[in-house]
């Protein structure tokens, strides 16, 4: 059913193709000026109009009724209708994903010398062209080197980086763009209107978000809603068929990590799972958003592109979140989240690596000052803790505890180079006292404390402290109950056994 919807909505003229004006305008000019290339290469992600535009081009150049100053196909003549119904003898469409071999290419080549049977041009569209075998590429290349005048090749691919440069350089290349949320939103609204159903804007927004920039995906979801047979689609109705969207949750989750509200972050992971959410998808979603935050931090053009496929409300949220932490901290957070992917894939408890990452990130944030955090309870609590400590008393070392606390992450990051598990242990510990040149660090777990009593370990940490603070500090471990999320972490560790440590 949904596939028929694509066919139904496949734009019959260039004017209905949205978001690819940079392609359609150029092509339409070439059509009018009769300056068609011999081979085109259409690149870009799935469902954004490559095949659509390829067929439009084929139709336009073979249209029997098109006037010279016009670039649109008429969709009425024999040639146009044959293409629209998939019966044209002069349009050869090959899916390279299933016809990868040299024989398949030879077959195309055999067709070519005869020229078009009814029209001016013979058009060959090769979809997913990057899938061809090397031999097939070579065979194709020979044809591209000396193409007969009446043949037009249109190669389409979602993975242009897999194409040999020899092929790319022989084609006129067009990069199709991921469709922005605004463009998709308008397209959906337009299609719903044509179908005579009213889809509430919240639902349209949900679809846009699920579609990830692909018009085909967006139309697929709309198709599912249409089959419900309702005249009005409310969010409640939509929830029957649309997959649970989790962008809002992923953003909340990142917010919790930044504010070190670790237990809320872990709760969110678990309630997400209980509601039948796909944890791997959630993981990627969070990763993707963290990456976007990094791009926002880098600024300029990157920042604009980062959020183009998000709805405005989510764009705002993303920018707000990005402003709440430094680039260095974001980078650490991203690295730690990234690391959760490969580890423990086989774990029975899928959520565990993510929980652990959340706990660790929460502690990273906890040990240092949370920038830009407003007067939420959590940061009040932290200020209160700080006030109890003689934090700003400058010691003989010329440092004070707060300076050390603020740069604790750098120590954690530095040690990571040397030993991941040690770095982890220090990331969930915190500096609690500085007396002269002795730095006391609090550990919530005996296990950790024992580990840092090892003279070899002490030496490593002290070297790192010297590197970062430019002074020789002595490390002393102490047991510390006060670390936020301690119970939670110990739960996690118990479940996980001793493996976190080594
Ligand atoms: N830019 C667009 N404007 C309007 N509709 C579009 C656009 N892109 C895709 N669509 C809709 O999505 C359907 C699929 O598009 P199309 O087959 O052209 O995608 P594609 O880029 O070739 O994707 P794939 O790489 O998966 O083959 C079209 O029939 C059309 O309904
Ligand atoms: Mg296609
Ligand atoms: Zn026509």
Image: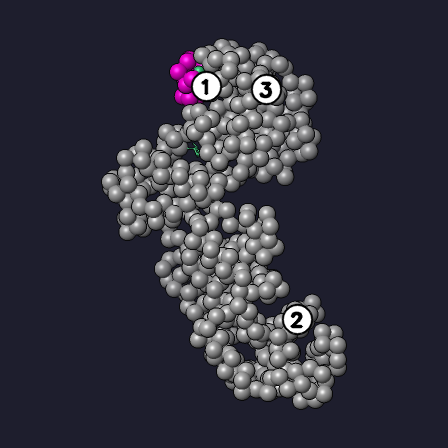
Marks 3 and 1, the one that precedes in the sequence: 3
Inter-mark Cα distance, 3 to 2:
58 Å
- Residue 71 image point, x, y percent: 50, 19
For the N terminus, give its image quadrant: top left
The circle drawn on residue 410 is 2
Q: Say what secondary structure mark 1 lies in.
A: loop
Inter-mark Cα distance, 3 to 1:
15 Å
Residue at x 62% of width, y 20% of height:
38
Marks 2 and 1, the one that precedes in the sequence: 1
**Front residue (pair 345, 118):** 118
Marks 3 and 2, the one that precedes in the sequence: 3
Q: Say what secondary structure mark 3 lies in.
A: loop
Where is mark 3, residue-wise? 36
Residue 255 magenta-highlighted:
no
Residue at x 54% of width, y 84% of height:
387
The magenta region covers 73-86
Q: Is mark 1 within 8 Å of ligand 3?
A: yes
- Residue 53 image point, x, y percent: 50, 28
Q: Is residue 476 visible?
A: no
For label 2, the crowd category at 10 Å Cα-Cα, with few meaning under 14, some 14 to 19 and many 20 or more, is some
For label 1, the crowd category at 10 Å Cα-Cα, with few meaning under 14, some 14 to 19 and many 20 or more, is many
Residue 76 magenta-highlighted:
yes
């Amino acid at each position: 059913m949904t596939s028929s919807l694509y066919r139904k909505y496949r734009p019959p003229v260039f004017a209905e193709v949205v978001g690819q004006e940079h392609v359609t305008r150029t092509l339409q000019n070439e059509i009018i000026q009769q300056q068609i290339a011999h081979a085109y290469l259409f690149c870009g992600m799935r469902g954004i109009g490559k095949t659509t535009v390829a067929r439009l081009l084929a139709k336009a150049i073979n249209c029997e009724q098109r006037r010279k100053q016009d670039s649109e196909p008429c969709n009425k003549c024999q040639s146009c209708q044959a293409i629209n119904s998939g019966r044209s003898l002069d349009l050869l469409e090959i899916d390279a994903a299933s016809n990868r071999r040299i024989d398949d290419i030879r077959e195309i080549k055999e067709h070519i010398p005869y020229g078009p049977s009814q029209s001016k041009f013979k058009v060959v569209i090769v979809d997913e062209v990057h899938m061809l075998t090397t031999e097939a590429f070579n065979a194709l290349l020979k044809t591209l080197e000396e193409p007969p005048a009446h043949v037009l090749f249109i190669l389409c691919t979602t993975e242009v980086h897999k194409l040999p440069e020899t092929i790319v350089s022989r084609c006129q290349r067009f990069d199709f763009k991921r469709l922005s949320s605004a463009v998709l939103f308008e397209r959906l609204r337009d299609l719903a209107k044509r179908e005579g159903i009213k889809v509430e804007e919240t639902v349209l927004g949900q679809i846009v978000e699920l579609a990830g920039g692909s018009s085909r995906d967006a139309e697929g979801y709309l198709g599912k809603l249409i089959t419900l047979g309702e005249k009005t689609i409310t969010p409640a109705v939509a929830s029957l068929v649309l997959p649970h969207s989790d962008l809002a949750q992923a953003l909340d989750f990142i917010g919790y990590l930044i504010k070190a509200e670790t237990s809320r972050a872990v709760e969110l992971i678990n309630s997400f799972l209980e509601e039948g959410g796909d944890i791997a998808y959630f993981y990627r979603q969070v990763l993707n958003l963290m990456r976007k935050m990094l791009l926002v931090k880098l600024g300029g053009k990157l920042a604009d592109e980062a959020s183009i496929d998000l709805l405005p409300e989510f764009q705002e949220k993303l920018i707000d979140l990005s402003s709440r932490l430094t680039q260095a901290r974001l980078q650490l957070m991203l690295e730690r989240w990234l690391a959760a992917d490969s580890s423990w894939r086989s774990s029975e408890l899928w959520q565990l690596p993510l929980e652990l990452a959340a706990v660790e990130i929460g502690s990273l944030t906890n040990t240092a000052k949370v920038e830009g955090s407003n007067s939420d309870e959590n940061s009040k609590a932290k200020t209160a803790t700080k006030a109890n400590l003689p934090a700003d008393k400058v010691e003989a070392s010329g440092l004070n505890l707060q300076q050390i606390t603020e740069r604790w992450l750098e120590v954690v990051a530095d040690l990571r180079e040397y030993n991941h598990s040690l770095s982890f242990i220090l990331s969930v510990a915190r500096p609690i006292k500085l007396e002269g040149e002795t730095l006391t660090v609090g550990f919530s777990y005996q296990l950790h404390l024992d580990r840092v009593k090892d003279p070899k370990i002490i030496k490593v940490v002290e070297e790192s402290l010297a590197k970062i603070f430019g002074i020789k500090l002595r490390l002393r471990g102490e047991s510390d109950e006060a670390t936020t999320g301690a119970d939670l972490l110990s739960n996690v560790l118990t479940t996980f056994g001793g493996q976190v440590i080594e």
